[in-house]
Amino acid sequence: MRRFLSFCTVALCLITLLAGFLRFYKLSIYPTGFHVDEASLGYNGYSLLKTGRDDNGNKFPLYVDIFGDNRPSGYHYLAILPVAVFGLTEFATRLPGALFGTFSVIAIFFLVKVISKNNRAALLSGFLLAIAPWHIVSSRASAESIISLFFILSGTACVMYALETKKITFLTIGSLCLILSFFFYHTPRVFVPLLVFGVIVLKIKDISVYSLKFKLTSMLCCIAIGVVSFLLVFVMNGGTGRFSQVSIFGFPETKLILEEQIREDGTKNIVPIVSRFYHNKIINYAFTFISNYFDYFTGKFLFISGGRPLWYKVPNMGLVYLFELPFIIIGFVYLVTQKNKLLALPLIWLFLAPVVASITMDDIPNVQRVMVLFPMIEVMAAFGVAHFIASNQRILKKIIIVFISICIVYNFAYFIHQYTIHGSSHETIYRFNGFKEMMQIVQKEYDNYDTIVFSKSSGGYPLVLFYMTYNPAIYQKEGSPKDKDYKGFGKFLFTSQPCPSVTEDENLPKTGRILYVNTGVCNISPLIKQTRVFREDGTLAFILVP
């Protein structure tokens, strides 16, 4: 037994090291480009470090508003230390995601071990998470949902361990971890209370085995989780900001479908009360929710092409390896047929995971909003592999292990190829490729100009702040102007015109030394002095005209 535990410890350490390597190797280079959301995370970490305020001038905020989306500020605070140590760089910004993504391997190992007492399934879960495309890509791209997921996995593991061992300390730690997940992404604020309710249903028959103190602590923890979730969503300023932007209840498309159906009924002289019976908000929203829900379980989304946002997509690559499909099915059947009630947890988790994402419309199916789904898919695949190998004879078992290993190596090699080779040249416009190179030129020439006219079509203002390492105190004194039309900060002036150097616009300055930053779509005569900046795929990104 000791020998196996020693092997288990060594194996977990090696898997964690593998996960760390896959998330930290050339972190500032891959993914190609640097998205505006990442720039905002890094710059706000820098702003908090220097002034204790975000780029809007809010002191130690719970939300940071970039484009009206009110993002939870947890990642911004985690970025403070890396930025202090490494400076305002891509590496420093991406470090928290890569670090917590690596630690998630340990978290999922302990979660599976607690609910199954199966070290092999736990190790396989950790290994599959370590090499999972969806997890590697998001961990390297400053995804707040990755850190939130770490706290959910860790918190659930501690809570389940507490329920098994009756240790109040782990119950408290687990509940705190679950609450911490609320401060990094929106989804956990609904998903975690639902998951807690699922755990209560799972263990309600065993309530008599716990002491009164444990029961009271459990009740207080549940109340704390519910209250914090409620306060962050409904009471705190900005809590519903992002939801109001993307929910099916306010999205124009869902309203349009309902109005169209009623109008079509009208052309057939259907009585209004009959039309309303079939075509009303309840039916319309229900159909939209169900359609969105099942989209997250389609083979195309999981195994073939992935989802949105586009800057997280790897060309011709799904989110989960294709070789896992048969083992996911085997694992699902295995979990369903087991008498151990704790093994129902992955199934409850799987059922609840897409609920929050299904009530949203913009950028769907959305990988980040449904991030909580994927760990349980890896867990089911791990149980499937473990059960499949265990149920075969020794000679056949060796053949199966070799075959699975070959499949894993090929699938993994294909993913790495797509991610590093094709990812750096396919649709790089979505990751603002070329912006850094353009800003290096602007930074070099900054003192030679009075005004730098910047097209908003080129990218968001956080990228300018980031690459200029713009003084946050000065930016806040300027009123945190962002990129409002014909306003700006420092020497930068923003316009919605994609080609400000050739557009007749009376609001743009006409005197002084002016540098125009045009988008790559502009048709500018080669006779005019200009500097061109290209993306890695060879397309024209920017044209700078003095």
Image (spheres, grey):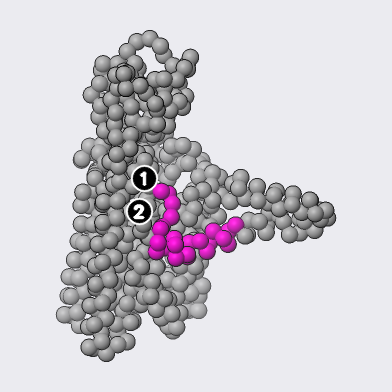
Which residue is drawn at the image coordinates 29% and 39% (left, top)?
Answer: 538
Please indicate whether residue 294 sits to the left or right of residue 259 in the image: left
Q: Is residue 271 visible?
A: yes
Is 450 inside the magenta-drawn segment? no
Q: Is residue 112 visible?
A: no
Going from N to C along the chain, the mark reached first, 2 or 1, is: 2
Q: Nearer the viewer, residue 192 or 519?
A: 519
Range drawn in magenta: 288-310
The residue carrying mark 1 is: 427
The three-letter amino acid code for the residue at tag 2 is: Pro
Is 295 inside the magenta-drawn segment? yes
Which residue is drawn at the image coordinates 32% and 87% (left, top)?
Answer: 391
The percent coordinates of residue 399 (x first, y second) are 24, 82
Dot 1 alpha-carbon crowd within 10 angstroms: few under 14, some 14 to 19, many 20 or more: many
Residue 315 - label: 2
Q: Secondary structure at mark 2?
A: loop
Q: Nearer the viewer, residue 342 or 263?
A: 263
The chief SS type of the magenta part is helix
- The Cα–Cα distance between marks 2 and 1, rounded to whole angstroms, is 9 Å
In the rendered image, which quarter is residue 180 located in?
A: bottom left
Dot 2 alpha-carbon crowd within 10 angstroms: few under 14, some 14 to 19, many 20 or more: many
Please indicate whether residue 417 sits to the left or right of residue 284 in the image: left
